[in-house]
Image (spheres, rainbow, N blue to C red):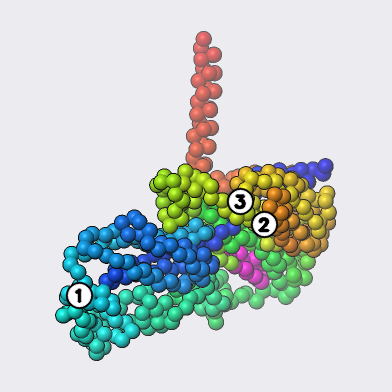
Amino acid sequence: MRPVFLLGILFASAFLIISVSAQECTIDVFGLDVSGNTIKGKVRNTGDINQSISYGIFVNDAPVLNESINLTPGSLKLIEKTHSFDTGEYKITLNASSGCGGWDSENMWHLIFEKYECENPHGLQGENRCDYASRQFQVCSNGAWNVVAENDNEYCWNCPSTCGDGACNCGETISSCYMDCIHGSCSQGYLDEYQCRESTLQRKYRYANCTTEWRDLYACVYGCAGGQCESYPGLPGCSVTIESLDHTNNVLYGRSTYTTSTVKNTGNITTLVNLTFFLDGQLREYYKKALGPGSSFVKTFNFNPGRTGSHSVKLNASARCGYSDARSFTLNVVSTSSSPACNNNNACEPFRGETEENCPADCGAARGETNVSIYPNQMDITLYTAKVVSVDIVSGIPQEFSISVSGIPEEWLSYSDRLDVARSRVAYIYITPQKIGHYNLSVNVHAVSESLDFGREIPVYVAPVSSEDIQKGILGQVLDFISGIFSFLATNLIAFALILIIIIVILIYIGHNYLRIDIF
């Protein structure tokens, strides 16, 4: 086996951190109220994917409604349930949960101390309400709803604006409350709109409720104008291009991820290329390398984005001769917070967020659907450098899975073609290419007991090894590894301090033994 192959496997095993692709899966329960004999509430999909949401209404912990609905990102479901109330005190609860893990709940206390006087809707003597449809403020008196105010000034005084209640009410406009005044939703993410704030380039970001804001991308070295960074004209024949960018768009909170880029000198002069990595506009890491005309290099930056939410990631390749190129994308970090605790009542209650994982006592018999996720979507690899395809398997029943790979020579691959899965398991396919070119990697996974098939076609580009890498050889790669350790310690002072303390303790121990031997 070639030393380069062994070294590639070693480095891939030591540094590769597989990140699970996930999307924002959140829901919001709000607006719970009781009007007469009608319980009302709202459920909104606040994530960025379509969700199948189950919701339920409980009166004094007894279920009175159990339904499901599919909601697109940002869309709202108005929930109403008629219930016969007698005099007394009632605890009203509205729970909602989605198949991808979103959960929310709201509850209130409802006190009935006398019989209703008004109908359609029910109301007590002296109770008031806002009729959004007719823009009237009404009061229940003498067994009927009587209009107290219906001109705009008096109506708005009694029925103030409440953005998010589903009605385009007093003072609300499309810009101030899009979700009420234009019934719809927006896909969340960056828009292709740019502007300059002095020498900083900004890009417009849109939320699921269609509100927008300008976010800083990065500072322009030679100034900003017309929504783009101005570039130094540079020397004749100077050109550098980021040819590809391999990354994942989603990662779980606390997990690390990566971005791999291929940078090429597309000019006709030799120059030093500086590749800089920015996270949320802050410089995190950089890499420099001299490139001759037509030559290229592949660089991977591993990082932990930290907080949940959206992050902007940008790579900038600038040549010393004056030319530059940039690529950017949005990374979503999803929370792994668990659902409410199991109440151990021998009943699986999805409205409480109970699942087989967090409540085996109540949901032990409930099994999810079998599913297989294969990452990444595409790959860019340097010749003789190992990379990994992740196969994330979730099985509805304990069963055997078979994995087959085609489109790439078999001698480049290393993986287990059969494995047993009880509930979930991650399998890895290691690829070490030995010939440059474009390939189409086909991964197929078969669930034996259920006769289910899953697959993905992954475009793969194998880039040539630069002359500098060849000259450097294994010794150079080892030196790069040592340099990476020192770079990590330089940016992680706590780790550096711990290592320093360990070294000092070892030296004191050795010195103590030496003195003891010397004296006695």
> Picture coordinates of residue 288 (x, y %)?
66, 58
215 lies left or right of 369: left
Q: Secondary structure at mark 1?
A: loop
Q: Secondary structure at mark 3?
A: loop
Q: Count of labels shown?
A: 3
Majority secondary structure of magenta residues: strand
Q: Residues within 10 Å of mark 2 (few under 14, many from 20)?
A: many
408 lies left or right of 147: right
Rendered image: mark on residue 18: none
Tell me which corner region of the image, top left, top right, bottom left or bottom right, holds residue 162: bottom left
> Picture coordinates of residue 19 (x, y %)?
60, 53
Question: What amino acid does circle 1 point to?
Answer: Glu
Q: Which residues are magenta?
A: 313-328
User: Mark 2 or mark 3, which is nearer the start of the sequence?
Assistant: 2
User: Mark 2 or mark 1, which is nearer the start of the sequence?
Assistant: 1
Q: Quadrant of the N terminus?
A: top right
Q: Which residue is mark 1?
A: 117
Rendered image: mark on residue 396: 3
Q: Residues within 10 Å of mark 3 (few under 14, many from 20)?
A: some
| Residue at image point 78% right, 62% down | 440
Does 391 sit above or below residue 79? above
